[in-house]
Image (cartoon, helix red, strand yellow):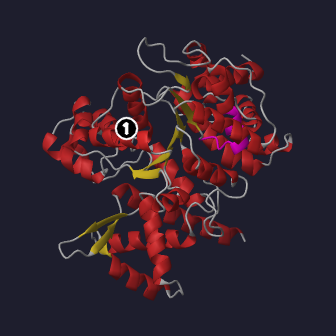
Amino acid sequence: MNAKEAIQAIDDLVFAKQGRWLEEPEKIVLRSAWLDLDYKDTAEKSPYDINLLQRRVAPKLWVLLTGILGNGEKVTKKRLRGIVEKRIVLADKESPKWNENADPVGLPILAGNLPDIFNFYGRTPELAMLKELVAQERCVAIIGTAGIGKSALVAKLIQALRIGSYEFNSFIWKSVSYSPLLTDLVADVLRILAYSENQELDLPESMQARTSKLFEYLRSRRYLVILDSAESLLQGDRNTSSNPYGNEYAEYGTFFNRVIEEQHQSCFLLTSREPFVDFNRLQQKGQPVRTVKLEGLGKEALEIFRSHGLTDEDKWGDLIKTYRGNPLSIKMLSEKIQKFFGGNVEKFLKFQTVLMTDIFQESLDELFEDKGRLTILEKQIMFYLTEELIKESRDSIALNELLNKFKEEQQSEVTTSELLEAIEALYARSLIEQKRNDSKEVLLSLEPQVIKYVCTHALKLVKNRVDHFQSA
């Protein structure tokens, strides 16, 4: 299979699974990976710069292809060719271009494949709440950290709605992890809707006309449109601008405002690792939009340990607490304990270590290393809080204590209001935790995986500065 054939086969699979074709920069990255070319040479022979291809397009493309081709194996630039050559033939037969989930019962899914939900635990209250919200609101955002189960929860919701409810006529599942421009996303959805109704689509040129055409569909029937991995649309630099979408994606702000404020009978359901601050403002004004923060599992997570055959059941609660009930983290942990310790939890606990999934680490890399995802002040608070918790061997620190010490030791002109806003933003991104003691005092803490990451990240920053100084 040559590069052209491989890219075409992958393009067909992406369309079958996600309802959209690969963008040109994505095809360029695929060709580079297939031919084992470095990004610098690839960029020089293309109209796109190396930063766009290597830092923005490639990481999201590998995440997308891991879900489609990986079968449990992470797709990377180096692994792509081997994975494709092993699996492309089987994967290409897996589904038709337009997936209507061929089961005899249930409403159609017009595009996209639901994630695997064979191993789904708990979430009964969350499902009941979401059923009500999507029936009542025009837009719902589910926010939560990587691996917490946002996509699986929505897939379970759709499964229930398809069979047991006729609130909606049909469903569209769209992953937007590749950061599509609004004009391209709307065009994709219009093609899906026109095809589903056996209509010829005369695609308008202007963004305004495309959006108006889309709203004609949203008013004519009840669609539930899922935008998965919607954090990729938040491209703004939070250090310099209050616009969460950035200049290139600013149209999304106007679009979502229209989705929320304009009369229609459909609903947009987003999953995201980061909050949409404009949604929160509209919700406070009484508009039909809701944000739901998804927390970890409780005792339901015990079933994950049980399914992996782990011993020392009395220790499982400690592991759930350490990993905050994150289903993906607990699944990874269970597999490691079974593989390296024969399923013996007590032997693993003797080493007093914290493990981290690739997806969890990658999500933190994006927050800490991508420009503008976290503000400078938010990063300072994270480093400071980590240092205080480790130095004083405490599980938490009082908010008032942190405010006083931070302002005193940092010797900055930052106001209390700015500090509180930064703490609130970190909490919304599941980076810090808040609770109250018996005296109703607010306490701040970090989960062990985050502490481990921040410590590692701080050491990496120090090493980079030393290397820079030595090479200067």
Q: Is residue 6 above or below residue 350?
A: above
Residue 80 quadrant:
top right
Crowd class of label 1 (few under 14; some 14 to 19; many from 20; radius 10 Å): some
Taking depth in this image into account, of 284 and 231 the one nearest to the observer is 284
**Relative to 303, 62 lies left or right:** right
Residue at x-position 66% and y-position 53%: 254
**Relative to 221, 438 lies left or right:** left
**Relative to 232, 25 lies left or right:** right
Q: Is residue 150 above or below residue 372?
A: above
Q: Amino acid at mark 1?
A: Lys
Q: Position of residue 121 (x, y in %)?
A: 29, 35
Q: Is residue 148 above or below residue 248?
A: above
Query: What number of labels is visible?
Result: 1
Residue 218 visible in rendering: yes
The magenta region covers 177-188
Taking depth in this image into account, of 334 and 203 the one nearest to the observer is 203
Q: Secondary structure at mark 1?
A: helix
Residue that carries the numbered disc 1 in the rendered image: 131
Q: Is residue 5 above or below residue 246?
A: above
Taking depth in this image into account, of 164 and 38 the one nearest to the observer is 164
Q: Position of residue 213 (x, y in %)?
A: 70, 36
